[in-house]
Amino acid sequence: MTATREPFRVMDCAITTLALGRSAQNLRELRDRVLEVPVRSISHHFYESLLLPVFDDPDYRNDFALWARRHLHDDRLAERLAVIDPMEFEDLEVLRQHVAEVIEDRLDETHVVPAVAAGHEFHFLSSRKVILDSGLRADTPADLAEMVPRLPTGSIFHHFVEGRRRPPLRVDDFSAWLEGWGEAFRPSRERLAAIDFHLWSLKEMRALIARSLRDAPREEAAS
């Protein structure tokens, strides 16, 4: 007999990008603006850009690192910024301080403050996110595995990327739900935990998630 459990409710999300009217033309200005903009701007530039239509650099996945590479032409700073994992910080304010410290350290190493030409400034943005109930439900892990390849990328972002920041568990929503199905699904949860969002687009993550769930045991085995 199959155990009775709450179905997995599939949510979707979309963002509206907002210009803050603040920019930086050199590295010192970037440090100063990082410390003063709304903290949602830090979140936007670190991982909400995944939801934007154009996302084409696999090595520099946050906007700060990308700007340092493309416009400041400072590969050393770009690499330091690129390896920052926002999921490792307890909140966005701590992340903000760390970013400012990385920039400050680079300023200490340079004799001249690096600057960009007019038209290549870093423009600080923020975003508003709308969360929608897709109406889709998965009653069993097998249902979820079948459903994932067809989910919109907004659902992948909400459940897999943002889920890892959501207290108190700070794990993706798929793994959190599978935990209620017992130890038989531990390998699936481990495969999901090994997917690093820094390395993949949302479409690529969707395929990896589907692959992680595909070999999960049937729900009868976990009853």
Image: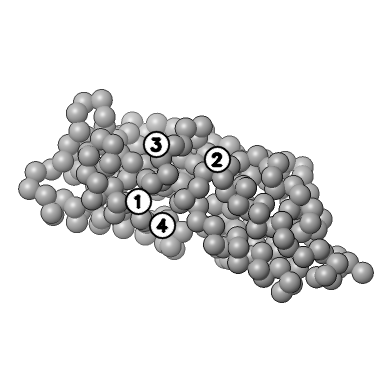
Which sits earlier in the primary sequence, circle 2 or circle 1? 1
Location of residue 32 with respect to 19 vertically, above or below? below
For marks 3 and 4 on the same chain, the one whose residue lies earlier in the sequence? 4
Q: Distance from label 4 to label 1 (Cα)?
A: 8 Å
Q: Quadrant of residue 171?
A: bottom right
Q: Nearer the viewer, mark 2 or mark 1?
A: 1
Residue type beneath disc 3: Leu
The image quadrant where one finds the C terminus is bottom right
Q: Secondary structure at mark 4?
A: loop
Observer-side mark, 3 or 4, equals 4
Instruction: Measure the alpha-carbon separation of dots 2 and 4.
Output: 21 Å
Q: Which mark is residue 129?
A: 2
- Residue at 52 percent of width and 39 percent of height: 51
Residue under label 4, please give it.
85
Q: Does 6 appear above or below 36?
A: below
Amino acid at pointer 1: Ala
Structural distance between the alpha carbons of marks 2 and 1: 24 Å
Q: Dots 2 and 1: beta carbons under 8 Å? A: no
The residue to which callout 1 is attached is 82
Q: Position of residue 97 (x, y in %)?
A: 31, 56
The disc placed on residue 125 is 3
Please tell me which of labels 2 and 4 falls first in the chain: 4
Tell me what residue is drawn at x 19 percent, y 38 percent. Answer: 26
